Image (cartoon, rainbow, N blue to C red):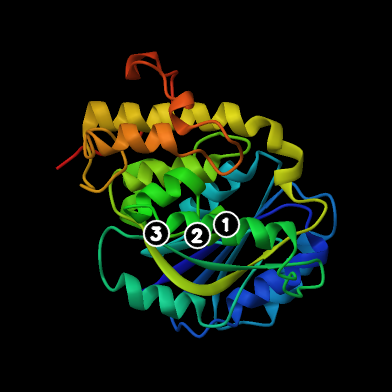
Amino acid sequence: MRVSVVIPSYNHARFIRQTVRSVLEQDHPDLELVVVDDGSTDNSVAIIEKEISFFPDVDKILHVQSNHGAHAAINKGIELSTGHCITILNSDDYYLPGRIRRIVELAADRSLFFIFTGIDFVGDNGEILEREHPHSVWYRKILGRVEHAPTVGFGLLQDNLSVTSGNFAFSRTLYDQLGGFADYNFCHDWDFLMRAVRLVEPEYLDLPLLSYRVHDANSTHSLRHLQEDEVSQILNGFLQLCQQKGTQNPLAPCPENWPRFFEVFARKQSFHFGSEPIAEYIRETASESPDAPTDVSSSS
């Protein structure tokens, strides 16, 4: 199975070398790397060009464009790619050895799949953060909460256990049905994830195969204020899709599949970033949901 790794790159010159090498040094034989530099103003492009030159036997594409945002860079990279399996890696993070091989083993030759793995949180220098670090504490907390969720989909609805789009691996068929990543500043990953859950139940590979780098320039710090508004839009857009088009995934976390349980779950559980129950973010009727990204699929 050909795997295309898409790296949306933006001003991470101090990290991008390790990011690129972590892909090119994977042990999967049929690999393609697509890097989309989204208007970096540092020397990211020069570093990328140098690093990929050391791996002449791997198919590589470097596309440089003006700044359009992470979602646009990801969509462009996927448009340029050729693999059946698509994975994403943010330009300040890096893969652990064997990640792609393990994902391909799990995906087999299925036409629809969505896979994510465990995560190690690391600092600027790549060292794993200590157990008491706030990110480590938070991650253990959501891992514990997910253990009590009835499905992986419910765990992702509540806590986004995947954490980042850089932890996504999915089939091209799924991407084509979803119509790409939408124009959200903060939660474009969760929007894509929830629309995917409507079609296929995600699989969690419980191994730490992605290193997520925590540093002062993480976009989550600068965009946190947008989170609640976008979460509300995305949640209601997802419920609207489930209501209007149904679900190909019979386990998708929505009232149509869980007519009694979903209401109880939404009233008792909160999102990971606050204390208000999920039900507080749900509008009375799906018709009140604002225009939201929709996919092109229909239920079977």
Which dot, 2 or 3, sits closer to the camera?
A: 2
Residue at x 47% of width, y 60% of height: 81
Cβ–Cβ under 8 Å for marks 3 and 1: no
Cβ–Cβ under 8 Å for marks 1 and 2: yes
Bin the neighbour count of mark 3 within 10 Å (Cα to Cα): few under 14, some 14-19, many 20 and up: many
Q: Disc 2 marks which amino acid?
A: Gly
The tag on residue 141 is: 1
CA separation in Å, label 2 and label 3: 25 Å
Q: Disc 3 marks which amino acid?
A: Phe
Residue at x 48% of width, y 54% of height: 145
List x then y, in percent, for residue 236.
41, 27
Q: State the SS at label 2.
A: helix
List x then y, in percent, for residue 295.
34, 36
Cβ–Cβ under 8 Å for marks 2 and 3: no
Left or right, 59 with reference to 194? right
Q: Disc 1 marks which amino acid?
A: Lys
Q: State the SS at label 3.
A: strand
CA separation in Å, label 3 and label 1: 26 Å
